Every structure is written in C-alpha cells, then in structure tokens.
Amino acid sequence: MIPERDQIFGALVEAPEAYERIIAPWKTVPGLDLEAALPVVLNTMYKRLIKPNQLLTNAQVWHELDYLNGANARAGTHFEFVCTRSGTVHGFAIWFETRLFREIGFNTQPGTTDSVYGQIFLPLFHPVKLTEGEKIRAGLHADLVGTDYVWRWELELPASPGREAANFKQSTFQGGRMSPSSLRKRAAEFVPVLSEAGLAERWLFVAMDGKTPLDQIAIKAAEHFPHTFARVEDAFRRAGEISDRYSR
C-alpha cells in the first residue's frame, strides 16, 4: 500500500549515549589503536530512538514525497536551524510524517515507539557545543545511486568563545556501506565469477521451465546446493520469492 504523502523532518540532537555506542568499540580495546576506523563508522547512518528532550533545534521539513503527483526520489536541502537550548550536538535526527489517506496517517517523531520507518541518526565527526539562540547552517542530501541511496550531511559553525569553527562534510559513500571490495566488484573492467549462492540463484531461474512445480524445484535445489540451502524449506522459500516476483 502506498501512502498519499511522506514528509521527512530533520533536526540537530544531543545524543551522547547513541554517539558513544558508535565510537566506543574503536577506542576501548587495550593495546590496540583502532581509531582509524572512526571516519568510517561516523560516515554511516544508524537507526536510533530519539527522545523529544534530546532536540537542540527546531525541526524543519527536509523533503516531501508526494506520491499522487510524482515523488522526487532525490532529496537535498540547506537549512538554517535555530538552537532552542544550550547543549552539545552529536548529529542529525531524521523522521517521517505520513499521510495514508485524507486525515489518516502516522508519524515517527522523537518520542514515538519504534516502527518500520523509525528514526535515523547521522553522527558528526565530533560533538560541538551550541548556545541557545545560535543559528546553524546545515545541509541534508540523499541521492539514489543504483538501487540504494548515498546520504550526505553538512554542518557549518563559526568560531566562538571556547569553541573552534566547525565545517563537517560527511557521506555514507565514505562509510561502512560501500567497501573497497564492493566498489571493485562494480567496476566496468571487473570480471565476475558467481559464488555458490549466485550459482544457486541461476539454477533456480533455469529450473522454472514452466513444467516443474515449486516443491520439486526446492527438493532438487537443496540437493545441488546444500551449503546455500541447509533445508528444503529454505530452498522452497527462495524459490517462492523468485516465483512471486518474476513468474507470470
């Protein structure tokens, strides 16, 4: 079911616990310096629950998906947030407000329970202190690349007493979602060789010849590819997914 409209909101938040969960594993291993991983994990998006009292700025509409009139899949906006209370900003929070039909809908704003949409946390390279009434220039962008999105977030702050100037430019392109191995396998000159899972997928497509029922396909698939399908039920489930998507 497709809603009529989605509005995506953004705000700056104080989230020390969520931030610490991200960086702690890379800073607390005795005898090992793993801090080279920090730029990777801090260029990654996370699903986290945010409380209303963690908001440091006013919330603003970042993007609107109007499904009735053609939703633009590319989102990009620059903001000027106003700090509503003094505190330390750890990143951006993003959430949805959905209109399903007329006045029927729901939202995932801070303070609501977890859901499929949930809330997204985009951490900064390092926390920064803010003062009530201060104006903060920021940007949020999401660009569809292939079948997935590359997210970018920016924050610019001038120097102030007790604080150096900050100019963060971060992106999931530099994060954990795109590894060197993944990029190598997408290169034009790369020669792919199917893994066993890939061979199993290809076999399932060929086996759907218009004559053989799914249960028989699943039994044979489990026999041919025991490392991919530990049980016949696993092969049947995958065959059913392929059938649902591609069969006539």
Image (cartoon, rainbow, N blue to C red):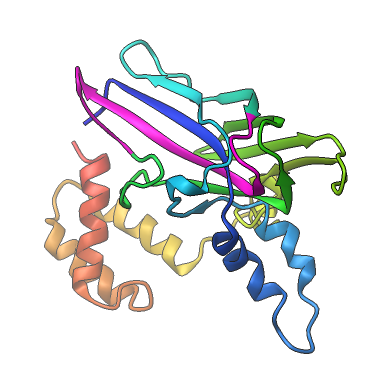
Give the residue at x 51% y 49%: 54
Q: Quadrant of the N terminus?
A: top left
Residue 239, position in %: x, y? 24, 57
Eyeballing the image, is 200 above or below 91? Answer: below
Does 99 appear in magenta?
yes
Q: In the rendered image, which quarter is residue 168 located in?
A: top right
Q: In which quarter of the image is the C terminus?
A: top left
Residue at 58% across, 41% down: 56
Identify which residue is drawn at 58% across, 33% down: 142
Q: Check the image and report above or below for 35 versus 52.
A: below
Q: Is the magenta stretch mostly helix, strand or loop?
A: strand
Question: Furthest residue to the bottom?
Answer: 31
In the displayed structure image, the side of residue 200 where residue 82 appears, left or right:
right
Task: Specify the segment rendered in magenta.
Answer: 82-107
**Residue 189 in view, yes or no:** no
Q: How many labels does the image show?
A: 0
**Could you tell me residue 36's position as x and y percent?**
79, 67
User: Residue 167 location, x and y as percent?
Assistant: 81, 39
**On screen, residue 233 above or below 136:** below
Tell whether 214 sits left or right of 179: left
Q: Position of residue 9 (x, y in %)?
A: 47, 31
**Residue 101 inside the magenta-drawn segment:** yes
Residue 156 seen in render: yes
The front one of 153 and 16 is 16
Closer-to-camera residue (23/189): 23
